[in-house]
C-alpha cells in the first residue's frame, strides 16, 4: 500500500478559529477513504485543503505538512493549477457548466493544452465511459448538459473531473442530492474508479461509508479521532466517540 | 451531550429483558424437569413439556424483533454485535428448553426411582449444567467477559460428570442386564444434561463475540 497524500500535524485556522488540529492522516493510493463526522468537524475543510480550495478564503492559515507524492502541497513548488489537475473535485450539488455535454468534458483538456479534434473526441468518450455515462448520452453530446437528470449531471461532473486525467478524486457528499437509484450508480462507479484513481469522499451517510470505502476517518471538532479499515471502524471502533457517532447516538 | 435514538435504546433494552426472561424460563425448566425426575411427579413433568411452548414463542418473538431492528435501525458496531448475539443466543436457549422437556418426557416413562447413588450424581450434574445456564445469561446481562470465560470452563465439570455417570451405568448394566431399559433412559438424561452444558458454553462464546467481535478465536465481523 503506497501513500499518495499524507498530512502530518496539519493545523488550519479560519482567523482565530482553529478548524483542524494536529491532523495526521495518510491516504493510500487506489483506495476509497471516507471522511465522516458531524457538521463542523473539519472533514470538508480537510478535503478542500488537499487541493487548496481553502486558499480563496480570507484569513486562512495552515501549519504542518501536507504532501502529495512526497511533495509539499503548501509552501512548495507545486503549482496550484497542476495540483488541481491531479487532484480533481466533485461537489455536493452537480454543477455542470451551461454548455453542451461535449463541451463540459472538453473544457478542462482545452485549458490544459491543445488537442486535435480526434484526440479530444476520444478523450470525451473515454471520460464519459469512465463515469459510466457514455451509453446514456452518446447520441446527444451536443445537447445542453442542463437537460440531464441530477444523477446524470453528477456523473457528468465526475467525467469532467476525469477528463484531465487526475490521480485523486475528492468528493464532497457527491450523492446527498440524488435519489437512491442514482446514488447506487455513483457508488458502483466509485468502486470502478478506485481501480485507477484514489478517492477521498466526505459523506454524512454512514451506510454509504460502510458500503463503499476501504478506510474510514472520523473527525470531531477538528480532531481526527480514529482512522482504520472501514470494516473495523464499523464493527469494533476503538474510540467510544466513534462508536457513539456511527451508531447515531450523537451528531 | 444529547443522546439520540431513545426509541432504539428502549427497544434494545426490551430485547435484553426478553432474553433474560427466556433464559430464566429455560433454567427453570431444567430445575422442574429434574424435580419431576426425582420425585416421580408426572403432572410436573407434563407441565414442563407443555411450558416449552412458552420458550419457543419467546424465541420466535425475539427473532422477529431482532430482524426488524436490523431492517429499520441498520445497526453498526456494538448495536450490531448485540443484536446478532441475541439472534444466535436464542437458538441455544431454545434447545436448552427442548432438552429440559426431553428429560421430563423420559421421566414420564420411568416406573421406578433411580438408585440413590445414580440419582445423587445426576442431581449434581444437573446443578452444574443449570449453573452454567445461569452464568451464561448473567454474563450477557452484565456484559461480563470474565464471567463468560469462567462459565465456559465449567463445561469440563459437566463433561466429566457425564463420563463418570456413564461408566457407573455401564457397570450396572453389566451386573444386571435386565435393567437395561431404565439404564438407557438415564443415559439419555445425562446426555441431555451434557448438551445443556454445551449450549450454555455456546451462549458464553456469543457473549465473548458481543464484547470483542471474536468468536471461538476468530474475528467474524
Image (cartoon, helix red, strand yellow):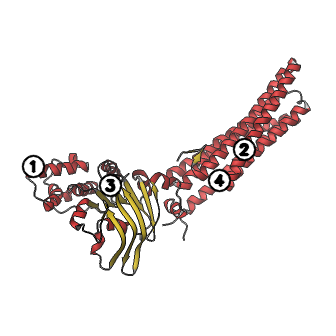
**In the shown orientation, is residue B25 left or right of residue A235?**
right
The reply to whether discs 2 and 1 touch (Cβ–Cβ < 8 Å) is no
Where residue B215 sits, quadrant-wise, is: top right
User: Which residue corresponds to mark 2?
Assistant: B153
Comparing labels 3 and 1, the label whose residue is closer to the camera: 3
User: Distance between the Cα atoms at labels 3 and 1?
Assistant: 28 Å
The reply to whether discs 3 and 1 touch (Cβ–Cβ < 8 Å) is no
Residue closest to the far bottom? A16
Comparing labels 4 and 3, the label whose residue is closer to the camera: 3
In the rendered image of this protein, does residue A216 appear above or below residue A38?
A: above
User: Distance between the Cα atoms at labels 2 and 1?
Assistant: 75 Å
Q: Secondary structure at mark 3?
A: strand
Comparing labels 2 and 4, the label whose residue is closer to the camera: 2
Comparing labels 2 and 1, the label whose residue is closer to the camera: 2
In the rendered image of this protein, does residue B137 appear above or below residue B47?
A: below
User: Which residue corresponds to mark 3?
Assistant: A198
**In the shown orientation, is residue A46 left or right of residue B32?**
left
- Looking at marks 2 and 4 on the same chain, the residue that comes earlier in the sequence is marked by 4
- Check the residue under mark 4 and report the chain it is in: B
Front residue of this view, candidates A95 and A12? A12
User: Which residue corresponds to mark 1?
Assistant: A118
Where residue A20 sits in the image (x, y, percent)?
Answer: 41, 71
Where residue B108 sits in the image (x, y, percent)?
Answer: 82, 30
User: Which residue corresponds to mark 4?
Assistant: B16
Where residue B46 sits, quadrant-wise, is: top right
Amino acid at each position: 500500500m503506497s501513500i499518495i497524500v499524507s498530512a502530518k500535524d496539519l493545523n488550519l485556522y479560519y482567523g482565530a478559529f482553529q478548524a483542524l488540529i494536529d491532523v495526521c492522516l495518510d491516504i493510500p493510493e487506489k483506495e476509497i477513504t471516507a471522511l465522516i463526522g458531524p457538521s463542523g468537524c473539519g472533514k470538508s475543510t480537510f478535503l478542500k485543503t488537499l487541493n487548496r480550495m481553502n486558499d480563496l478564503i480570507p484569513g486562512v492559515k495552515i501549519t504542518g505538512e501536507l504532501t502529495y507524492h512526497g511533495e509539499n502541497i503548501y509552501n512548495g513548488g507545486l503549482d496550484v493549477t497542476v495540483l488541481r489537475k491531479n487532484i480533481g473535485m466533485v461537489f455536493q450539488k452537480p454543477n455542470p457548466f451551461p454548455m453542451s455535454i461535449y463541451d463540459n468534458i472538453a473544457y478542462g483538456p482545452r485549458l490544459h493544452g491543445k488537442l486535435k479534434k480526434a484526440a479530444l473526441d476520444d478523450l470525451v468518450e473515454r471520460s464519459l465511459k469512465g463515469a459510466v455515462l457514455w451509453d446514456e448520452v452518446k447520441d446527444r453530446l451536443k445537447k445542453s448538459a442542463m437537460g440531464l437528470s441530477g444523477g446524470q449531471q453528477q456523473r457528468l461532473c465526475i467525467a469532467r473531473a476525469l477528463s484531465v486525467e487526475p490521480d485523486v478524486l475528492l468528493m464532497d457528499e457527491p450523492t446527498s442530492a440524488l435519489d437512491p437509484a442514482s446514488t447506487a450508480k455513483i457508488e458502483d462507479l466509485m468502486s470502478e474508479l478506485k481501480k485507477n484513481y484514489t478517492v477521498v469522499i466526505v459523506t454524512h451517510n454512514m451506510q454509504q461509508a460502510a458500503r463503499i470505502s476501504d478506510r474510514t476517518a472520523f473527525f470531531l471538532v477538528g480532531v481526527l479521532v480514529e482512522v482504520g479499515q472501514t470494516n473495523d471502524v464499523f464493527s469494533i471502533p476503538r474510540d467510544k466517540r466513534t462508536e457513539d457517532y456511527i451508531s447515531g447516538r450523537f451528531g | 451531550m444529547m443522546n439520540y435514538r431513545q426509541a432504539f435504546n428502549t427497544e434494545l433494552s426490551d430485547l435484553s429483558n426478553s432474553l433474560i426472561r427466556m433464559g430464566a424460563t429455560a433454567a427453570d425448566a431444567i430445575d422442574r424437569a429434574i424435580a419431576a425426575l426425582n420425585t416421580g411427579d408426572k403432572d410436573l413433568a407434563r407441565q414442563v413439556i407443555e411450558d416449552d411452548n412458552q420458550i419457543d414463542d419467546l424465541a420466535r418473538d425475539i427473532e422477529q424483533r431482532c430482524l426488524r431492528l436490523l431492517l429499520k435501525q441498520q445497526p453498526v458496531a456494538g448495536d450490531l454485535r448485540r443484536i446478532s448475539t441475541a439472534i444466535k443466543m436464542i437458538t441455544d436457549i431454545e434447545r436448552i428448553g427442548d432438552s429440559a422437556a426431553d428429560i421430563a418426557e423420559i421421566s414420564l416413562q420411568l416406573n421406578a426411582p433411580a438408585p440413590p447413588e445414580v440419582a445423587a450424581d445426576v442431581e449434581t450434574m444437573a446443578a452444574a449444567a443449570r449453573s452454567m445456564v445461569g452464568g451464561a445469561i448473567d454474563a450477557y446481562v452484565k456484559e461480563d467477559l470474565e464471567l463468560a470465560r469462567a462459565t465456559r470452563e465449567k463445561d469440563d465439570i459437566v463433561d466429566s460428570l457425564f463420563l463418570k455417570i456413564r461408566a457407573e451405568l455401564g457397570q450396572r448394566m453389566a451386573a444386571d442386564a435386565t435393567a437395561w431399559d431404565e439404564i438407557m433412559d438415564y443415559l439419555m438424561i445425562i446426555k441431555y444434561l451434557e448438551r445443556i452444558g454445551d449450549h450454555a458454553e455456546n451462549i458464553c462464546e456469543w457473549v465473548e463475540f458481543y464484547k470483542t467481535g471474536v468468536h471461538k478465536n476468530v474475528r467474524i465481523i
